[in-house]
Image (spheres, grey):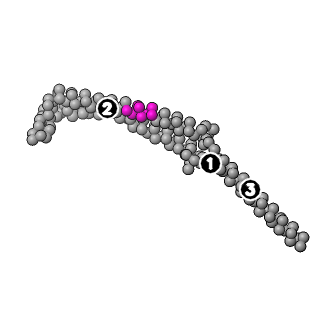
Amino acid sequence: MNKAYEELTASVDNIKLSNESAHEAMKTQMDAVLGPLTLNGTDVAVQVQAFKELLAAEEGEMDKRWQNWEEIQKELAVLGVQVLGEPEKKDGIVGNAPDGCKVQSEKWQKELEEQLKGPIEELKAAGEEAVKKLAVAEKAGAKGQTGWFGY
């Protein structure tokens, strides 16, 4: 009977120890989930706010470039009317420029495309840079982090 009692006591002690270990592991995980989210030692909320500010600045740059684009388009329309005259309208449909202006119009079109290469490339580069920055932020958050970035 003593031997059975000792085996039962040892079995209960093993189960108790196993449960305590599981409890400690769950407590550690709960503390990590319920505690403040940090990434590289910085509060995630601070990092999110910094990213929002960066994004706002980049959006401002994009807005300026689009405004520049619209101004150029307006200038081109005015120059077109000054050089080519008012477009012909037949039955409410705007017709083509007279043939005598076609060569000059094509030349200006090429010049315009050359002038716009820079701003267009800047727009593309700014968009690509914003995507890269977002990818870096996502990767940084996904490395071993649970919560907002890593789910």
Position of residue 10 measured from the top left corner of the image (x, y, whole percent)? 83, 64
Q: Which residue is mark 2?
A: 69
Q: Residue at x 89, y 73 (%)?
A: 1
Of the image marks 1 and 2, the number of the one nearer the N terminus:
1
Residue 102 in sight here: yes
- Cα distance, mark 3 to mark 1? 19 Å
Circle 1/circle 2 CB separation < 8 Å: no
Q: Residue at x 31, y 30 (%)?
A: 115
Part of the protein shown in magenta: 56-63
Q: Image height check: is 27 above or below 84?
A: below
Q: Residue at x 60, y 38 (%)?
A: 43
Q: Which residue is mark 1?
A: 33
Q: Is residue 29 left or right of residue 111?
A: right
State how many labels appear: 3
In depth, the one of 128 and 74 nearer the eye is 74
In depth, the one of 28 and 109 nearer the eye is 28
Q: Which residue is mark 3?
A: 21
Taking the magenta stretch, the answer to whether it contains residue 62 is: yes
Q: Pointer 1: residues within 10 angstroms few (<14), some, or many (20+)?
A: few
- Cα distance, mark 3 to mark 2? 65 Å
Taking the magenta stretch, the answer to whether it contains residue 48 is: no
Position of residue 92 measured from the top left corner of the image (x, y, whole percent)? 12, 40
Q: What secondary structure characterizes most of the magenta part?
A: helix
Of tags 3 and 2, the one toward the viewer is: 3
